[in-house]
Every structure is written in structure tokens, then in C-alpha cells.
Amino acid sequence: MKSIWFTFTFVLIALITRPVGVLAQGPPINTDTPILLGLEGKAAMVRVMVVKKSQLYQDGEKISDSLQREVDGMMFPIAIPYNITSDFLVGGMIPLMNVRAKSLSGSSSSFGLGDLSLFAKYLVVQIDGLQETFRIIGKGSIKLPTGNKNLTPPLGTGTVDYSLGAVSAWIGKRFGVYGDVSYSLNGTSGGYKFGNSLNYNVALGFRALPAVYETYPTEQWNLYLELNGKHTGKDEVNEQELSNTGGNIIFLSPGVQYIPSREFILEASVQIPISQKLNGTQLGTSVIGLIGVRALFF
């Protein structure tokens, strides 16, 4: 719980101590953004995510693993958002997944589509000043069980899950401060229920080049430093909690973003776990790498 409060404090300080800052910056890489696409804007986002799990934890402490268990995943999330109006956006996201698990006792792998997510965002607050803006949106999503849960490793949870949250940001001149929080209510499949989860993120953005943004569009480079956290409750089987599930994890996520034109964004980030307070005995996350492209169409 200390790590969660540390992150919330960091978010609060970041939003209060706003730098004085022409307004131009791409969206954060791992944290959501309250900046919508504009009237009838359409976009596509394709990413490659690599996840590696190879360190065993017991009650939040690293321990040796006699079975030498590892899980490697490569995911290709494809998202398509669309603005219904200038302040209301809807969209969908589905990942193509390749997951491999191995240990001294053997290995297995799965490949295919994961669970489909449908989402919506609505602009609640917009306060524009001289070369700065402050915005808040509300967001919600529903995850559908399109991934095969019967494979080993599974590609989906087999449940319908719901999520509600909010995103805020202040952006001015070369700086941006972003905060994102959401809570997920997970369903039950075959008597098994994954724990509900709280996601919390904060991002600090800095436009490295150009130092002065004079005309739109202008080629630019952005740097991001993010804290990305997730607190998950314990899974349940027939309403009985499983001790070796759930916990809290926080990543420190530096990233770089290149915007060559008004239509495209190229970005890369690495997520390094700085706190893994996992319940019982679990395989923790070693690193997450991400590269992606976003394309905007009008």
C-alpha cells in the first residue's frame, strides 16, 4: 500500500507544480490522454509489446526457482478510435498474441487473438489559457471474451469485464503532466474469477525538439518519464480466495516519441518494475518493451 500512496502523491505534486509554458506535444506512451482526436477524427494504433517474466517472488521478496519457470509474451495490440463529436470518442482494441511458457518440466505456447475491448471517452472539463490547456475526461470500457481461454497458456480470461476511470492533463509550451486512474470489475467463468484491479498512471512529458514551436505541423521529438501501477485483488474459485494471486506492481517507464508529420507518431518505451508486492508465491515481471506507430486520418 505504501507504493500506491507514493504514486498518488507523485501524481498530485506533478499536477500542482505545473511548469510555466506554444502548446504542442504528442500523447504519453503508456498513460492515457484526455486530448481527443477532434471532430470526426479517425485513427489507428499498432504496437508491438514484449513481456518477460522470469523472477519468482514470495510475499514480495525475490526467491530462487527450482523449476526455472519463465513466461515470454509478444503482443500486437491494434486499436481504432473514432470521434463521434468533438468531445465524445469511441473505439475498439484487440491484440494478436504469442505466449510461451517453459520450465524444467516442459514448455507450451499459444498464438491467436486475445480479448476484444470496446471503449468510450467523454470530455468533461476543458480550460484553455495562453499557450496552455487543462482537460479531464471520463472513460469506460467493456472487455469481451474473444480470446481462447482453453489454450495453454490461455489467450483470454473467458469473462466479460467492465472498467471506469478518468484522465487529466495539463499541457503548456514544452511540458505536459498527465494522470490516469481506472478501476476494473472482472466477471466469472466456470467458477473462476480474476481479481478486480486498480490501474494508476502518471506521465511527465517534455518536447525536446524543437525548442520553440512556431508553425503547425512541425517535426518534433518528445521525451516521457512515467510511473505505471496496477493493484489487483486475489482471484477466487467458487468464491474462495487464492493465496498466490493478486498484489501490486509499479513500473518506471522512460520513453521517446517522434512525430514526423501531423498524421504519424512513432514511439518506444521500456517498463522497468521498481516495486512488486505480490501475494504468496508468483512469477513477477522482469521487463516490458514497447514500440508502436499511431496514424491519424481525417
Image (cartoon, grey):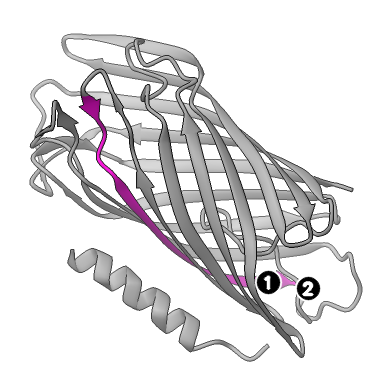
Which of the 4 quarters of the picture holds residue 177? bottom right
Distance, label 2 to label 1, CA atoms, is: 7 Å
Q: Residue at x 8, y 37 (%)?
A: 243
- Residue 264 visible, this orientation: yes
Which of the 4 quarters of the picture holds residue 76? top right
Q: Amino acid at mark 1?
A: Arg
Q: Amino acid at mark 2?
A: Pro
Mark number, residue 281: none
* Image mark count: 2
Q: Residue at x 18, y 68 (%)?
A: 2
- Residue 228 visible, this orientation: no
Question: Considering the image in quadrants, where does the N terminus appear?
Answer: bottom left
In the structure shown, which secondary structural element does the residue marked by tag 1 occupy? strand
Residue 208 included in the magenta stretch of the image: yes
- Provide the residue designation for mark 1: 207
Residues in magenta?
Answer: 192-210
Q: Residues within 10 Å of mark 1 (few under 14, many from 20)?
A: many
